[in-house]
Image: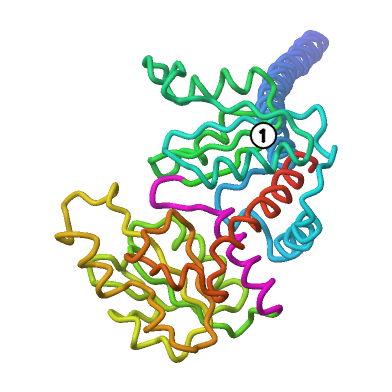
Amino acid sequence: MHGLRIKERTHKQKRGVKDFFHVTSFFAELYHRELNEVLTKLTVKFCYYFRKIIKERCVNHLINTRDFSLEEIEKLLERATEFLDEKPREILKNKTVITIFFENSTRTRSSFEIAAKRLGAMVVSLDVSRSSSSKGETLFDTAANLDAMGPDAIVVRHKSSGVPHILANYVNCPIVNGGDGAHAHPTQALLDLFTMKRHFGDVRGKKVAIVGDIKNSRVANSNIELLARVGVEVILVGPPHFLPQTDLRVYHTIEEVIDEVDVIMSLRAQTERHANQIYASLKDYGADFCITSKLMGDRDIIILHPGPVHRNVDVDDFMMKDPRSKILEQVKNGVAVRMAVLEKLIEH
């Protein structure tokens, strides 16, 4: 009897050990399977974010001026100075730049195309009125098809704010914002800063009065952001319905600030963005906000304007020809600055 009990006990112990190993193996297998699933998911996520980081590192865009650090802007403007000689280069030889403008433009489009050609790039200018987008193709399909052609940069202007930012997620080349709605116009702000630096040298502590339809102006938005970063005080001047909500100093007549500013940046009335007619005529607006020779007197103030200028509404004929007007100099500087931008983004 005693021997039988020992055998039964031994048998139970062996069975218990066997069951223990079965249970242990089950949980071990379950653990490894779940661990593999977790590791697989982590690997997939890692690869996704790694590719995203690599893409972001490899493809830079210029959607607004904050896309460039102050150090990058300083180097870019130094490079633009070298491009003022207007000599052709082969820096972007065998590169292709596409310009696609959904809003009318003379200065910006021509400036970008001349800039690209002076760097040796091929330029493809998409005529929106004849493109597939006019036949119902979505903007994003247009971008995807253009991207499939392998351009090295796309310059886009659109009436809707945010379009260049969205397009940047659909292409594998740099997107340059040539102006989007009332949001931003980064290259205009860069060339305005460049023009001021060419005139003053150090711009820190200078005061700029932006005059006109500021609420609807992408140029104003980009300049307000950029100039604040480089130590320039921006003052806004215009009728109440042309001014945005802001913490900046605001005035309703130019006479209130003209004796303290170094620069007057005049803006045209953005009538195409007005839901209702605000002034009976542009002459009525000009009577209050036109930059005239009488207003300027002999003050040492430079005049800037992004164009197109409404003569005798924004700036009068006499001031357009005055040496203090840097408007044509802005146009010249714009080509050099955009050459520096294209070189930086494409050769990055």
Identify the residue under disc 1.
Answer: 153
Q: Is residue 157 left or right of residue 336?
A: left
Q: Secondary structure at mark 1?
A: strand
Viewport quadrant of the C terminus: top right
Residue 72 sits in quarter = bottom right
Q: Position of residue 262 (x, y in %)?
A: 53, 83
At a point 49% along the width and 77% down the height, the residue shown is 208
Magenta segment: 180-201
Residue 19 sits in quarter = top right
- Above/below status of 217 relative to 95: below
Colour convention:
rainbow
Q: Main secondary structure of the magenta part?
A: helix
Q: Nearer the viewer, residue 184 or 237?
A: 237
Q: Is residue 30 left or right of residue 207?
A: right
At a point 50% along the width and 60% down the height, the residue shown is 222
How crowded pointer 1 is (Cα within 10 Å; few <14, some 14-19, many 20+) is rated as: many
Question: Would you say residue 58 sits in the magenta stretch?
Answer: no
Residue 15 sits in quarter = top right
Q: Nearer the viewer, residue 174 or 256?
A: 256
- Above/below status of 276 relative to 122: below
Which amino acid type corresponds to the residue marked 1 in the rendered image? Ala
Q: Position of residue 40 (x, y in %)?
A: 70, 24
